[in-house]
Image (cartoon, grey):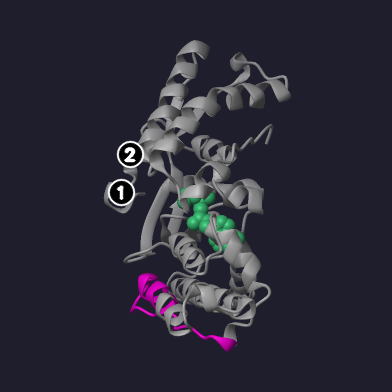
Amino acid sequence: MVANLVYSQEQAHAPYGGVVPELAARAHLEKLPALVRDALSHQGVRGEDVDLIAVTRGPGLAGCLVVGVGLAQGLASAWRRPVVGVNHLWGHVYAALLAQQDLEPPLLALVVSGAHSDLVRMTAHGEFQVVGRTRDDAAGEAFDKAARTLGLGYPGGPAIDREARRGDPSNQPLPVPSLPGLAYSFSGLKTALLYRVRDLGGLERLAPQTRADLAAAFERSVVESLVRKLDHALEEWPVAEVVVCGGVAANSLLRSRAQEVLNDRARLTIPPLALCTDNAAMIAAAGSHVSPGGELRADPALGW
Ligand code: KG4
Ligand code: ZN
C-alpha cells in the first residue's frame, strides 16, 4: 500500500448527532481533490504512474457517490487510464485480503457497517452470495442509536465501545436478538434499551456506572447475536477462511468473541482498525480484482 488518506467528517456531523447527507456531499466536493493530490505528492507519484482508478459506485449516499464518480472519471480522462466502479461492501471484504497477504476465497465474511449486517459467502474473486442479513437496523446503526439513547454522542460505535469497557453487562442484562436461520434484527434491542432507560428514570437520572453497564449490555447483545449466526453459517458452509469486516469490526468485544467462537475451525482475519472503517485502500484492493463488467454480477436487490 503506497498511501491511504482519510478525511474524517466526524466533527462536521457531530453537532447533528448523525450524518447529514447534504453536508457530507459538500465535504466530498471540497476535500476530495486535495486529498487525491496529497496522496500522490506524499509518495512522489504522478498521475501517469497510476494503472487503474477505482471508485465506490454504491451503496452509499447519492450526493457523495456522484462527487466521487465524477472526480474519478475526470482523472481517468486526464490521465488516460481506465476507471472501475467498486461495490462498497466488496471493498470491506477486500480490506481483509489487503491485511492478510495469503488470504484467498473461498471464504465466509461477516460484513458489519453503519448500514449493513450481512453474512456473505465469497466463492471466488468478484463472486458473492448473501446468506444472511438484517431484517431492520444494521449493527452499526444500532450502536449509533444506542449511543444517542445513552447520551454518548456521535459517532456512537466507538463511544459505546469505550463506555462498555468500564461496565458490567450482567448488571443490566438486555435480550440477545434471535431470529430463526441466519437473519439478524436489532430494532427490538434498541427499543429494549430505550424502555430500560425510561424505567430507570430517564437519561438525566442515570448514574455513570449504570450508563456504562447499559453500554456493556447493549454491546454484548449485539455481538453475541452477530457471532452466533456467524457460527451457524460456518456450520452450514464449512470453509477454512473467515473474515469479519466493516466499521463495526473495529469493536473490541466483537474482535475477541469472533476469535473465541471460531476457535480453530477456521482462520479468522479482521482488518486492523484503520482498514475496518471506510477507507480508500479497500476500494483500490477490490478494484484491482474487478474485471471490466465483472461487478455487474452483483445482486442489486441485496446491495451486493
Ligand atoms: O463501514 P463504516 O465505516 O461506514 C459504513 O459503510 O457505514 O461503518 C461505520 C459504522 C458506524 O455505525 C460506527 O458507529 C461503527 O461502524 N463503528 C463501531 C466502532 N467503530 C465504528 N461500532 C462499534 N464499535 C466500534 N469500535
Ligand atoms: Zn463502509
Q: Quadrant of residue 73?
A: top left
Residue 107 colored in magenta in the image: no
Residue at 37% x, 63% y: name it. 137
For the point 45% across and 48% down, the residue is 89
Instruction: Give the labeled residue for mark 2.
Output: 296
Give coordinates of residue 155: x percent, y percent: 54, 55
Magenta segment, prevailing SS (helix, strand or loop): loop
| Quadrant that contains the N terminus | top right
**Residue 263 image offset from top left, x and y in percent:** 63, 76
- The residue lying toward the viewer, choosing from 192 and 86, is 192
The answer, for residue 243, to whether it is visible in the render is no
Q: Mark 2, residues whose alpha carbon is within 10 Å: few (<14), some, or many (≥20)?
A: some
Say if 90 sits above or below 37 in the image.
below
Residue under the point 47% across and 75% down: 225
Packing grade of label 1 (10 A; few <14, some 14-19, many >=20) is few
Query: Regarding mark 2 in the picture, which secondary structure is present there?
Result: helix
What's the residue type where badge 2 is placed? Leu
Judge left or right: residue 289 versus residue 47.
left
Give, as a single range, the part of the protein colored magenta.
171-193
Residue type, label 1:
Asp
Horizontal side of residue 27 vs 135, given as left or right: right
Residue 87 picture location, percent across and down: 42, 42
Q: Does residue 143 appear to the left or right of 130 in the view shown?
A: right
The answer to whether residue 191 is magenta is yes
Q: Is residue 28 visible?
A: yes
Residue shown at 57% from the left, 44% from the top: 11
Counting from the top left corner in percent of width and height, residue 47 is at 59, 16
Write down the residue under mark 1.
299
